Image: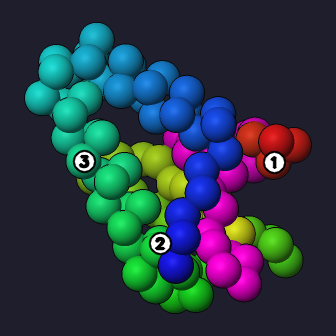
């Protein structure tokens, strides 16, 4: 299945990596990026296994970081709408 990222997902990931680099160094920032890559791969491999966030979106949680990705499953692709911290308001990024 094809993966499509909303253009702002790159900013979401960059913002989180910048935070982790400031707070814990480059290795921690790289670990976050690796976790994001694993989540992306898992979403593509088994998109329907993730819990529904609402009627249109599903949520994939990161294992090592308090983040999750919200995505939709279309007939021929998966679309990641937002990557956000678990403490963000539940509406953050939904208007993209």
**Which of the labelled discs sits on residue 84, or is there none?**
none
Q: Quadrant of residue 31?
A: top left
Few, some or many residues within 10 Å of mark 2 (<14, 14–19, 20+): many
- Residue 69 visible to the viewer: yes
Question: Which label lies toward us, 2 or 1?
Answer: 2
- Above or below, comparing residue 27 to residue 82 in the picture: above
Q: Position of residue 18 (x, y in %)?
A: 37, 18
Disc 3: which residue: 34
Give the SS element for disc 2. helix
Query: Image check: 35 left or right of 72?
Result: left
Q: How many marks?
A: 3
First in residue order: circle 1 vs circle 3: 3
| Magenta region includes residue 44 | no
Of residues 64 and 7, the one nearer the viewer is: 7
Disc 2: which residue: 43
First in residue order: circle 3 vs circle 2: 3
- Residue 58 visible to the viewer: no
Q: Which residues are magenta?
A: 73-92
Q: Quadrant of the C terminus?
A: top right
Disc 1: which residue: 94
* Residue under the point 87% across and 43% down: 95
**3 and 2 marks in contact (CB < 8 Å):** no
Query: Image check: 23 left or right of 92?
Result: left
Give the SS element for disc 1. loop
Q: Position of residue 19 (x, y in %)?
A: 38, 19
Distance, label 3 to label 2, CA atoms, is: 14 Å
Give the SS element for disc 3. helix
Few, some or many residues within 10 Å of mark 1 (<14, 14–19, 20+): few
Distance, label 1 to label 3, CA atoms, is: 24 Å
- Above or below, comparing residue 39 to residue 48 in the picture: above
């Amino acid at each position: 299945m094809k993966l499509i990222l909303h253009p702002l997902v790159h900013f979401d990931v960059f913002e989180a990596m910048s935070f982790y680099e400031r707070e814990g160094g480059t290795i921690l920032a790289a670990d976050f990026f690796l976790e994001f890559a694993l989540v992306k791969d898992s979403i593509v491999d088994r998109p329907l296994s993730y819990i529904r966030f609402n009627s249109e979106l599903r949520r994939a949680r990161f294992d090592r970081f308090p983040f999750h990705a919200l995505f939709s499953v279309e007939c021929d692709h998966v679309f990641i709408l937002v990557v956000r911290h678990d403490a963000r308001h539940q509406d953050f990024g939904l208007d993209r």
